Amino acid sequence: MSIPTHEPRPLVMGILNVTPDSFSDGGQWLDRDRAVRRGREMIDEGADIVDVGGESTRPGADVVPLDVELERVIPVIEALAGQVRVSIDTTKEAVADAAVDAGATLINDVSASLWPTAARHGVGWVAMHRQGTAATMQRQPHYDDVVAEVTAMLADRAGRATSAGVDEVWIDPGIGFGKSVGHNLSLLGALSELVATGYPVLVGTSRKSFLGSLAARPGEEPTPVGERLPASLATATWALAQGARMVRVHDVAATVQAARLVGAAGSGDTW
């Protein structure tokens, strides 16, 4: 297993949703030129990877036709691939194929099923855990032991990918994807169990709804999406301190600062 970093800090993946309906930034970057500008801003802010997605995976999101998803993501990937490492956030094999041809070198896979595609192209692959589909995943999610079940599933998929010849395999517990607030907290509290599998761990909590619930004062409505930066930073820092090697975020600059601090503390550097 190779981990693509020479940085003295954990990695930061910037989220670039080229969609009209993503939960946090839907519609902001749907225009190709605006998306490319935002991607370049994230590069300037220190993003190690820019994750381009053309289909929302939020709860209740509609499936996007193949041609529409391709039209959204490929021009953006082509524009950014020579300037930063680009990942494609998709569950469609055809989109992953076209994205790699356009310059993407990592497949960020909510379905945890595209390892044969990654093996065929010789690129990296992220296996994420999700219970159900976008349409059903938040309808009373249930686990007997969420940590054990998520860990076992991801270790299984990662093992299959490694056996198929994928050299770079990441695992992601899928915070908020078919999980209650309690499930999310259990997984964050037990990240060491995922880290112990030996596969590098990616965690994405940025601006998610459970943060809004937890950050709200008693009796108040959940904190709005645009006011969840402190909670997002807190959970990203926690994940990195527990051994996650990368976090996926909307707020790149602030998270890069946090990652530098975690990296410095973990290395034992003196000043």
Image: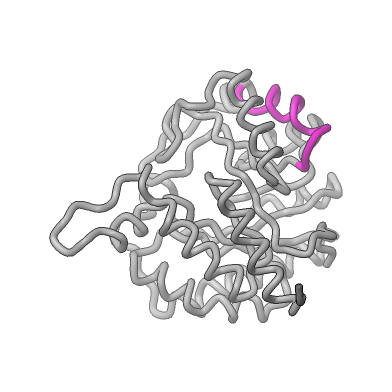
Q: How is the image coloured?
A: one colour
Q: Is residue 254 visible?
A: yes
Front-lying residue, 75 or 7: 7
- Residue 42 location (% of width, % of height): 65, 38
Residue closest to the far left:
219
Name which residue lies at 53% across and 44% down.
Answer: 250
Which one is in front, 188 or 56?
Answer: 188
The N terminus: image quadrant: bottom right
Secondary structure predominantly adopted by residues drawn in magenta: helix
Q: Which residues are magenta?
A: 72-85
Residue occupying image coordinates x 48% and y 52%: 206
Estimate the x, y position of residue 35 in percent, counting from the top left: 60, 26
Question: Residue 13: where, in percent of width, then height?
Answer: 65, 49
Q: Is 79 placed left or right of 33 in the picture?
A: right
Classify residue 90 by image quadrant: top right
Query: Is 102 covered by the magenta stretch?
Result: no
User: How many numbered dots are placed on residues in this image?
Assistant: 0
Between residue 15 and residue 174, name the one nearer to us: 15
- Look at 76% across and 73% down and name the residue there: 271
Residue at (40, 38) in percent of width and height: 61
Residue lying furthest front in this view?
A: 271
Asked whether residue 91 appears in the rendered view, the answer is: no
Left/right placement of residue 266 relative to residue 223 reads: right
- Residue 197, relative to residue 231: is it above or below? below
Q: Is residue 84 magenta?
A: yes
Q: Position of residue 223 (x, y in %)?
A: 28, 51
